Image (cartoon, grey):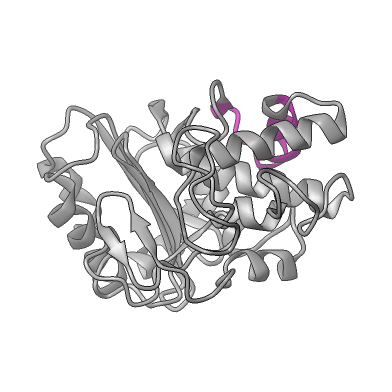
Amino acid sequence: MAALRMIDDWPVDNAAVAVVAADGTVSAHGHAGAVFELASVTKLLTAVGVLLAVEEGAVELDAPAGPAGSTVRHLLAHASGLAFDEHRVRAEPGERRIYSSAGYEVLAELVAGETGIDFAEYLAEGVFAPLGMADTVLWGPAGHGARSTVADLARFAAELQQPTLLDPTTLTDATTVQFPGLDGLLPGYGMQRPNDWGLGFELRGDKSPHWTGGRNSPHTFGHFGQSGTFLWVDPAAGCACVALTDRAFGGWATPLWPALSDAVVTGGDAKAARGGRPAGGGADA
C-alpha cells in the first residue's frame, strides 16, 4: 500500500488516509482514531441527513426554502443565490452556482423545525449512530462544523458506495448534476464552466485543475475542506478515498492531493483494500 504512505511526506503535523473498496473493506494508514476538523467535508454529512429527512417525509426536495423562489434542492446544489457565508441574496435561484455555507445553515434549521429535533442530534441519531460513527459530531454550523476520524469517514464512504440509510435511487439523484450548465467558482480553483454539483456532492466532471486526480473518472463525487481534508468516491475505480490533515488547504495541497488520488486509482490500492478489514475496523494498517 505504498500509495497511502505518500502522506508521510506531506508538510503536515498529523494526517490519516483510508481507501474503501466498493465491498466496504478498508486499507488505511496513519492514526485512524485521531479527530480532525472536517470543514466543508461536513456538507456531505449534512446532505445525507437532509436527504434522510426527505425520505422520511419531513421535508420535500422541491419545497420552498431559503430566498424567494428557492427550494431545498436549490440549497443543496448551491443554486439558491445565497452568498457564501451570509444570508444575503446575490443571484436569482437557478441562475448561478454560488457556493454557500449559509445555505446549509438554512437547511439545518428547516429540518430541525420540521422534525422538532435539533439538527446535530438528528444527524447523530439518523446517520452517525447507524453507521457506527462514534467519534463524529456536528459541533458547529451545518456547512463546516463537524469533527471526525478517518475510521468513521471510511464507514461513511462505504455507505456512499453501498447505501443502507438511503434508497439507492436517492443517492443516484444526489450524485447527478442538478441545474445543469450553471457556472460558478469552485473554492480554491477558480471559475468553472460549468461548475457541476449534485445534492450536496461536488461532481468532478471535466474540471481542471481539481483537487482529485487526473486519473479520477468524471463520475467521481465528494468534497474537500479548507481544514485540509477530502473525501471522494469514484464509481468507475470501485473505491473511495478519505484524507484528513491538520493543516489548512493551500498551495501545499494542490499538487499532493491529486498525486495521492492518482496513485490510489492506478496503483492497486483499491484492490489491496479488498484484502483489508471491513469498514468497522479501527487500527492503523
Dividing the picture into quadrants, the one containing residue 45 is top right
Determine whether 100 is above or below 91 in the image. Answer: above
Across the whole image, how many numbered discs are drawn on residues? 0
Who is closer to the viewer here, 201 or 124? Answer: 201
Decide whether the magenta segment is chiefly helix, strand or loop. helix
Who is closer to the viewer here, 255 or 90? Answer: 90
Dividing the picture into quadrants, the one containing residue 164 is bottom right
Q: Position of residue 188 (x, y in %)?
A: 25, 50
Left or right of 137: which side holds 214? Answer: left
Q: Position of residue 96 (x, y in %)?
A: 48, 62
Q: Position of residue 207 (x, y in %)?
A: 31, 71
Residue 150 visible (yes or no): no
Please name the residue shown 53% across and 67% down the image: 22
Please name the residue shown 56% across and 65% down the image: 23
Residue 172 visible (yes or no): yes
Left or right of 126: which side holds 239? Answer: left
- The span shown in magenta is 121-137
Based on the picture, tell me whether residue 108 belongs to the magenta stretch: no
Who is closer to the viewer here, 44 or 149? Answer: 44
Dividing the picture into quadrants, the one containing residue 189 is bottom left
Q: Position of residue 204 (x, y in %)?
A: 39, 69
Q: Quadrant of the C terminus?
A: top left
Q: Quadrant of the N terminus?
A: bottom left
Please name the residue shown 40% across and 67% down the image: 183
Left or right of 138: which side holds 168? Answer: right
